Image: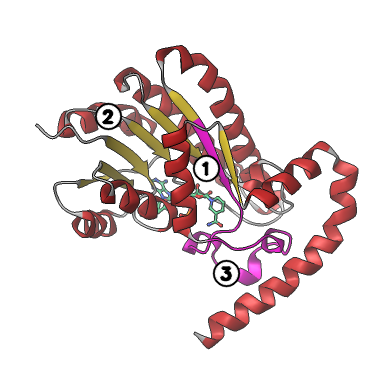
Amino acid sequence: MDESKVAIVTGASSGIGLAVAKRWTERGGRVALIARTADKLEAAARELGGERAVAFPLDVLDLDALTALPERVAERFGRLDVVVNNAGLNHRGPVERFTPAQLAQVVTTNLVAPIVLSRAALPRLDRGGSIVQVASLAGMVPVPGEAAYSASKAGLRAFARAAAYDVEERGIHIGCVCPGPVDTGFLGDLEEVPDIVLSQPMISADEVARAVLQCIDERVDEIALPARSGRLATMAYLAPSFARKIRPVLERRGARNKQALLAARRRS
Ligand SMILES: NC(=O)c1ccc[n+]([C@@H]2O[C@H](COP(=O)([O-])OP(=O)(O)OC[C@H]3O[C@@H](n4cnc5c(N)ncnc54)[C@H](OP(=O)(O)O)[C@@H]3O)[C@@H](O)[C@H]2O)c1
């Protein structure tokens, strides 16, 4: 029987989720890949190796399907050790630009779904099991133009912290990874990204994947990356007047970074 550890990774067909699945399988783990687009997910499973990676096409907004997932995965692989709640959604712009349903979709994808999947997975996890929530720096300090997104990611951090206490006596770890801007399709049209977001250094999906594995291995409560950006975000959250003061400076820096990134993309 294959005793290698099994992880569920949501949002696993691209970006951070795919990078996590790659690192997990490279170290000998097996993985259930979750995303909506079946053909992309099947291609990812083939790339990672058919026996180690299996596609489970699913929309995390389907909370019943999400609830049933840990059992399906445990049946397929014989065990479940890790869940990485990574699928996410952002609608950028002032809050009134979006319908109530669009705003609710952001909160359901980023917060309700991870809570539901964590709850469903817990009875299947043994001592040593781990759940990692992929939040954001936007959950550490609210970002203008990303109100529902910031709220959902702040909520996800709060859920991780509180639920970690609930399960620690059972030897189960729940942690959180909070990246700044990451070079994936998630950012969309760079012109539309708020300047303040790009004031922080852009990192790669693989750097975030490394942090996710570190969070699992070392059973860390929370990792912000880059670490310096995490410290700045915490200070800005604790002192709203400081946040207002430094905002124009950060926006100017972000605007410069944005132009440099756009120029680099035009050249490539
Ligand atoms: N990129 C950044 O700058 C950044 C910064 C901080 C935090 N994050 C967080 O990192 C996470 C991953 O982002 P990423 O940058 O890797 O994005 P990405 O490259 O766009 O990948 C998103 C993944 O999520 C899947 N997905 C989206 N909605 C889904 C749904 N309703 N149900 C199931 N799967 C869904 C997508 O596949 P399908 O479309 O096929 O479903 C895809 O596999 C998100 O939670 C995001 O908030 C990203």
Q: The magenta stretch spans which residues?
A: 175-203
Left or right: 46, with 258 as reference point:
left
- Type of the residue with mark 3: Asp
Q: Residue at x 26, y 48 (%)?
A: 25
Name the amino acid type tagged 1.
Gln
Direction from residue 46 to residue 232 in the image, left or right: right
Mark 2 or mark 1, which has the lower sequence index?
2
Asked if residue 36 shows in the view, the reply is no
Vertical order, 216 against 171 (above or below) = below
Q: Residue 113: percent from the left, percent from the top?
A: 45, 34
Question: Does the magenta run of residues contain 1?
Answer: no
Q: Nearer the viewer, mark 2 or mark 1?
A: 2
* Residue at mark 2: 80
- Residue occupied by mark 1: 105
Tell me how far mark 2 sits from mark 1, CA to CA: 28 Å
Which badge, 3 or 2, comes first in the chain's sequence?
Answer: 2
In the image, taking residue 87 as reference, residue 156 lies left or right, namely right
Q: Secondary structure at mark 3?
A: loop
Secondary structure of the residue carrying numbered label 1: helix
